[in-house]
Image (tube, coloured by chain):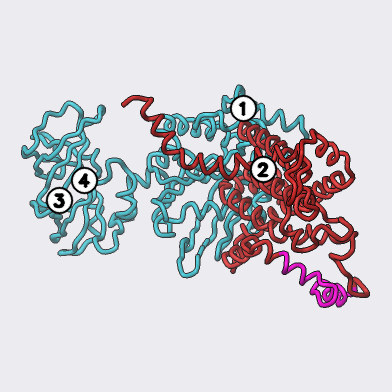
Chain colours: A cyan, B red
Amino acid sequence: MSALEIRNIQKRYGDVETLKGINIALESGEFLVLLGSSGCGKSTLLNIIAGLAEPSGGDILIGERSILGAHPKDRDIAMVFQSYALYPNMSVARNIGFGLEMRKVPTAEREKAVRDTAMLLQIENLLDRKPGQLSGGQRQRVAIGRALVRNPRVFLFDEPLSNLDAKLRMEMRTELKRLHQLLGTTVVYVTHDQIEAMTLATRIAVMRDGRIEQLGTPEEIYDRPATLYVAGFVGSPQMNILDAELTGSGLRIAGEEAFPLPETFRSAVTAGRRVKVGVRPEALRLASADVTGIRLPASIEVMELTGPELVTTARIGEQRITACLPPRTSLMPGSAQVFCFDEAALHLFDAENGRSLLAR
Amino acid sequence: MSGTWISTRAWLLMLPLLVVMIGVIGWPLVDTVRLSFTDAKLVGTTGSFVGVDNYERMLTGSSFQRALVTTTWFAVVSVAAEMVLGVLAALLLNQRFRGRTALRALMILPWALPTVVNATLWRLIYNPEYGALNAALTQLGLIDSYRSWLGEPGSALTALIIADCWKNFPLVALIALAALQAVPRDITAAALVDGAGPFNRFRFVIMPYLAGPLLVALVLRTIEAFKVFDIIWVMTRGGPANSTRTLSILVYQEAFSFQRAGAGASLALIVTLLVTVLAAAYAALLRRAAGAS
């Protein structure tokens, strides 16, 4: 039984179609991340699930029951907002317990639930404070507590970490992962941050222009991106995309010497077809005599040491390529080097429609 | 540059304004205080010193006490009604619907009208022979015959309060609407998800955002209502049978109709003192509210 099923959800504002038929079925305990840049429709979809917006078509089921038209409070969901949305005039305890208070849960039971939740989130000492007296991270914990205390069937998170600084964001990310592992809750989480998506999700739906570009586990999204958009969106630094041409049974990248096309792509190609080649920066290494693989001669432009790696930008003809090399690699700007990578790390996309040419 | 020079220049720059202020506010105030201790008439005699006679007579006289009750009643009822109406109108105009912008602009109209125009308008509405109110109530079967709403002591003050509310609730609505627009959308959405109904959402979530701005509106409107003169002067001149005579009307009558400048001055100062006390109380309230938030 699906915990949450989104069936062909559409949303139009006048002539503008912001959601063009979204289908997702979520098992109980899954952590689904809706990932996309701003304006892709991910927050609209979340608001529709929450009941804060009505779809123009389609259906949403929570536990096999259609919730369309139901009041947000009757949907068995809880939501955490980007701005935390805490009630500024109420204490932390009342903020957390407000949902229970509105549902007329007896005071003793409510107070116990609030205490237990506060303990879980390590904010017991803040219960008497007002939101204005809390730091950003503490407010976020209270907002999460307000959702947890009601123990709903589905949790909705709308970019909950975007307002935090980088360090705190990492801490809260780990905290969210810990809570999810501990409680096994079903979560729909909206973000534009691909690291958050990769680290938290059990499945990611990459969205673009109101459609799902790819739905899969983080590994699938990262290792086998279905389109150029997904390939470019997930991964940091982002995947290198190079112009290439198919020459019978070979592949010529950026006008360099052609090499035999790996077996996995053979069925998908016709000679003379223009394609795009994708290689992740972390798949590239400097070629040496004993290293086999696909070779790319390049001219080094810039090296940036991040600590764990040396992010190197180089030129191949008119195109740029980024490689993540070991930190102690010695290179000189302007020097000629040969990068190489394994066949398995090669991604091939149709230059016309951007779809992956990987045989499925 | 020395501090003395800056401060001297500052005083020099303020001097023209200070002269004007002393001329139009300071001196008249001092002269009013002087007048209030004399039996001066408006024309003829400059009067002689009579001590606190004027104050004693005013404070113990039945006219003052009745006017104080009338003024308080007028201020409390009209301001309370304006607050309720203003907030309701703001809540309505904060919803999304077609023609909202036009309606928002229209709502300001009564407030933008000069008080005298508003008062004349309502006098026509209340007219005992051809007034719209009489026509409407008769046609609805609520009254049998036309009544003189402003001519009967029982209804005149209520009729005035209605006219004053109509003119002034848009100000409250405008302030409340601005405050409503500052309520974060996420917070009302959170309250919806938390299961708060319309009443609880208003009470627990929206009201805290409205309270501060509404307090300012309350201060402004109470002080104005306490000083009310023009709308009453145009509509009833304090009548019938002094049933709508507020403190400001009484001051005017004492000083100008009865030409008792000394007594009028003492009364005016009493009203000023009352309004000052009111303003100080509200200021303290505002400070406390600001401290709480």
The one of A112 and A339 positioned closer to us in this rendering: A112
The residue to which callout 3 is attached is: A319
Q: Is residue B204 visible?
A: yes
**Is residue A222 positioned above or below B258 on the image?**
above
Q: Mark 2 near mark 1, Cβ–Cβ under 8 Å?
A: no
Please tell me whether residue A64 belongs to the stretch shown in magenta: no
Query: Dot 3 lies on which element?
Result: strand
Please, which chain is the residue tagged with disc 1 on? Answer: A
Residue receiving disc 2: B215
Question: At which x and y percent is residue B6?
Answer: 37, 30
Front of the two marks 2 and 4: 2
Report the Cα–Cα distance between label 2 and label 4: 72 Å
**Principal SS element in the magenta part?**
helix
Query: Residue B82: horizontal and vertical position, in percent?
Result: 72, 54
The one of B242 and A187 positioned closer to us in this rendering = B242
Q: What secondary structure is found at the residue carrying circle 2?
A: helix
Q: Amino acid at mark 3?
A: Gln
Q: Which residues are magenta?
A: B119-141
Q: Which corner quadrant of the image does residue B12 belong to?
A: top left
Q: CA distance from mark 3 to mark 4?
A: 20 Å
